[in-house]
Image (spheres, rainbow, N blue to C red):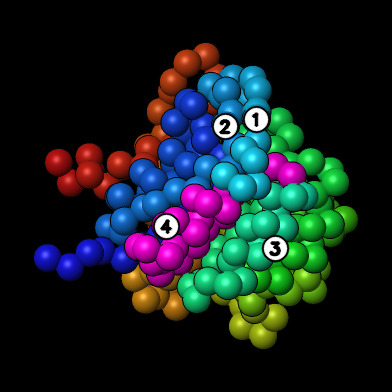
Amino acid sequence: MSAPPRVLTVAGSDSGGGAGIQADLKTMLALGVHGMSVITAVTAQNSLGVQGAWELPVDAVRAQYRCVVDDIGVQAVKTGMLASAELVETVAELIATTDAPAVVDPVGISKHGDSLLAESALDSVRTKLLPVATVATPNLDEVAQLTGVRVESEADLGRAAAAVLSYGPKWVLIKGGHLPGDAVDLLTDGSEEHWLRAPRHDNRHTHGTGCTLASAIASGLAKGQTVPEAVAAAKEYVTGAIAAGFALGGGIGPVDHGWRFRAGA
């Protein structure tokens, strides 16, 4: 039996299981690819927020990455929490030497408003990481953090996309989930535009949405889909996961990565 497509996530660990490495691997399993991981940081995290975070040494991150890529190989790479400028630059260098598409989720702030990226690392994201991205997937807070562009309405999404594209990714997906009304995202490479719309579900349990979407896109790319195809399929998957999100603990619960399994049961 041949192995399924392989996707490597380079991100932080979420002890609560809703986001980070844990969300990435659940998404990859649900979408039929083999998920592998490089852990960049360990967080003490629950439904109430990030209670503590400890980044791993650069040598440990590099060793994990080379160990997987050089032996097993990858069809796509996804990045999440990278924590520091040194880790951002190390991961960018590793991606640049890997012959596979890269989905960069420029994680800066958690769902609960906790900082997951040092202020000193922002310039490294702009100048080192975004230029090696096949697709960058910032939310509106991350767009503002990286570019200074503040999106107040759907009409601002094009300006935000242009600002992010100026740093060099091939495609950018501006996630408009924080705007009122339907959940509207804009995918563009500067010439093509794809507007993705989905109904907004009245469910506050949305922890892990960004990690899940980026991992779903990487899974689609690993299976040979084009960027627009992979993003459209990922949007459909994460919309279902949000609709099925469930309460855990006393705060914001996770999306349901296994919703399709239960829907078909």
Please identify the residue farthest to the left as the structure is shown. 1
The relative height of residue 221 versus residue 35 in the rendered view (above or below) is: below
Q: Nearer the viewer, residue 178 or 63?
A: 63
Q: Which residue is mark 3?
A: 129
Q: Across the whole image, how many numbered discs are drawn on residues?
A: 4
Badge 3, how many Cα within 10 Å: few under 14, some, many 20+? many
Judging by the rendered image, the residue that carries numbered circle 2 is: 42
Spatial CA span between label 2 and label 4 = 19 Å
Residue shown at the point (79%, 41%) measured from the top left: 118
Answer whether labels 1 and 2 touch (C-beta < 8 Å): yes
Q: Which stretch did the figure color magenta?
A: 61-84
> Element type at marker 4?
helix
Label 1 element class: strand
Q: In the image, 133: left or right of 212?
A: right
Q: Position of residue 205 (x, y in %)?
A: 49, 31
Q: Residues within 10 Å of mark 2 (few under 14, many from 20)?
A: some
- Viewer-nearest residue: 164 or 29: 29
Q: Nearer the viewer, mark 4 or mark 1?
A: 4
